[in-house]
Amino acid sequence: MSINPSRVPIHRILLAEDDDAMRGFLERALKKAGYEVRAYADGEQAYQQLMSEPFTLLLTDIVMPKMDGIELARRASELDPDLKIMFITGFAAVVLNSEAETPKDARVLSKPFHLKDLVAEVEQLLIS
């Protein structure tokens, strides 16, 4: 079970992105901005990590093997209702038109985007 993120001393981000290059770019940009980041190539790996460590933000692609980002976000919200969630995707309509239940305050950042825009969106989400 996840620890309440308000007790986590630094903002910790769980990143789930199946594209190796994109995952590397995102991880480096977020670390450079001062965040602690754990990055995984699929939703199953990310979910396993979420069950053993507390995070303040789940940053996930939507279309991934094994467990997609929507399912990951749904399960993550059940573990920790206070976890902030942001989807990064080239398929924003998938989230907006999905019948699957997505967490109510989840944000969507559509690809392509500049890394500085990602960092700004993450900062905005974490202070809200």
Image (cartoon, rainbow, N blue to C red):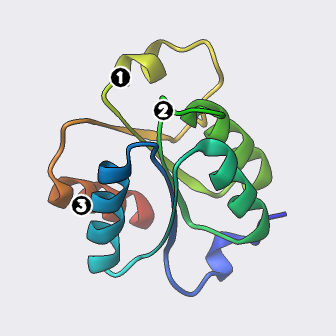
Residue 70 image offset from top left, x and y in percent: 59, 31
Q: Which mark is residue 56?
A: none
Residue 54 image offset from top left, x and y in percent: 68, 71
| SS assignment at label 1 | loop
In the depicted view, which residue is nearer to us: 37 or 8?
Answer: 37
Residue type at the position of mark 1: Phe
Q: CA distance from mark 2 to mark 3?
A: 20 Å
Determine whether label 3 and label 1 are within 8 Å by CB.
no
Name the quarter where the C terminus is drawn.
bottom left
Q: Which mark is residue 91?
A: 1
Determine whether label 1 and label 2 are within 8 Å by CB.
yes
Q: Which residue is mark 3?
A: 120
Q: Nearer the viewer, mark 2 or mark 3?
A: 2
| SS assignment at label 3 | helix
- Please tell me whether residue 40 is drawn above or below residue 123 in the rendered image: above
Residue shown at 26%/54% (left/top)?
Answer: 118
